[in-house]
Image (cartoon, grey):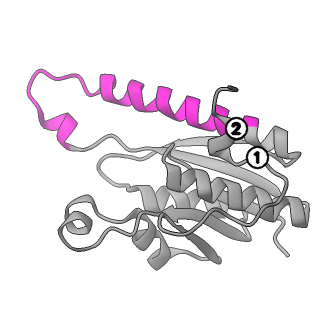
Amino acid sequence: MYQQILVAVDGSETSQRALDTALQLAREAGAYVQPLFVVDVPIMAYDVPSYDPSYVRDALLEEGKHVTEDAAACMRRAGVAGAPRILEADPVADDVAHCIQRAAADLKADVVVMGTHGRRGFRRMVLGSVAESFLRIAQCPVLMISAHCAQPAASGIPSASEATKEPS
């Protein structure tokens, strides 16, 4: 079974579902989980005259810090071992999919869990698909969690979305 699980997180509901699924797999197998957030500063931020792209980079790093802290808290509550990681994509030579592949290779991941938004047509063409790009270059099994599917089966683990809600 899986012993090293990489899960791509970006703070979206779909990536929370992927994290929930990775935690469930890890609990069942006693696996190590590494939530991964990739900072990808759009190349156009570098092309705007007199604009400092470090503002965008700093904001994305801060977002990554929050997302990975939330993922680490979910892991602690679930009793799952692991440590989050933040990687930065090189704006000229890299993309998110290749960063995920590098992280999976570094971890020697048995499986990569990631969400897919299921965009089609023009939205997919404009926004691209990290999941599809990664799937084409993956060197290990990939478990795709659709934005359109139900939550994973009850596992006694509070979902990432439940874990971040304020108590009422």
Cα distance in 3D space between marks 2 and 1: 6 Å
Decide: is 135 above or below 36. Answer: below
Image location of residue 74, percent across then percent down = 74, 41
Dot 2 surroundings within 10 Å: few (below 14), some, or many (20 or more)? some
Image location of residue 160, percent across then percent down = 66, 45
Nearer to us in this view, 114 or 48? 114
Which type of secondary structure does the marked residue at label 1 adopt?
Answer: loop
Q: Is 92 in the magenta? A: no
Q: Main secondary structure of the magenta part?
A: helix
Q: Residue 19: which quarter of the image?
A: bottom right
Residue beneath the point at 42% across and 32% down: 60
Q: Is 71 in the magenta? A: yes
Q: Residue 32: which quarter of the image?
A: bottom right
Residue beneath the point at 42% across and 47% down: 89
Image location of residue 98, percent across then percent down = 46, 61
Dot 1 surroundings within 10 Å: few (below 14), some, or many (20 or more)? some
Instruction: In the rendered structure, find residue 24 and report the number of the disc placed on it.
Output: none
Decide: is 102 above or below 137. Answer: above
Residue beneath the point at 70% across and 48% down: 159
The residue under label 1 is 158
The residue under label 2 is 163
Q: Please state which amino acid type lies under the numbered disc 1.
A: Pro
Image location of residue 57, percent across then percent down = 37, 30
Q: Earlier in the sequence, mark 2 or mark 1?
A: 1
- Farthest residue in the left direction? 49
Magenta stretch? 44-73
